[in-house]
Amino acid sequence: MSSRLAELQVVLEGVPLPAAKQMLVDHARGEDAARDLVAMLERLPDHEFSSLDEVAEALRPVQPPPPEQPHEPKPESGVPPGGEAYTDASAEPGAVRERGPES
């Protein structure tokens, strides 16, 4: 698929950007692009694209999809430095604690 995307970007060179989906399809047809390349463009959402990279991203997202369910945090290895004060959101920075860390 990535080689076809590269071919598509070559076909779309020179198209005035930003361009709507239909303009991209018309440009590809005017360049006598292969049918499968035109079909790829026809699957694009009706949107105005500001760059050819944006077109490629719409056809094949680079970023992985977000996970379905967040995973449970892994247990930490030992007690954090400073004990409970490390995770105490109400702790005042630089304040002297009444009791020190447990030994």
Image: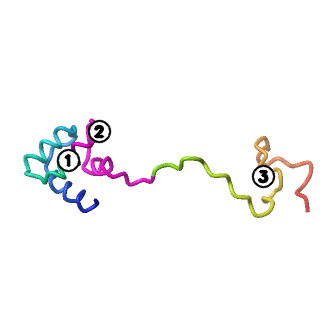
Q: Residue at x 79, y 59 (%)?
A: 81
* Residue interval drawn in magenta: 42-64
Q: Nearer the viewer, residue 54 or 69?
A: 69
- Between disc 3 and disc 2, the foreground one is 2
The residue type indicated by label 3 comes to: Tyr
Question: Residue 55 in magenta?
Answer: yes
Rendered image: mark on residue 45: 2
Among the 4 quarters of the image, the one containing residue 20: top left
Q: Secondary structure at mark 3?
A: helix
Numbered tag placed on residue 39 in the rendering: 1
Mark earlier in primary sequence (3, 2) = 2
Q: Comparing marks 1 and 3, which lies closer to the viewer?
A: 1
| Whole-percent x, y for residue 26 in the image | 12, 42
Residue 86 shows which numbered tag? 3
Identified at 20% across, 42% down, the residue is 17
* In the image: residue 3, left or right of residue 101: left
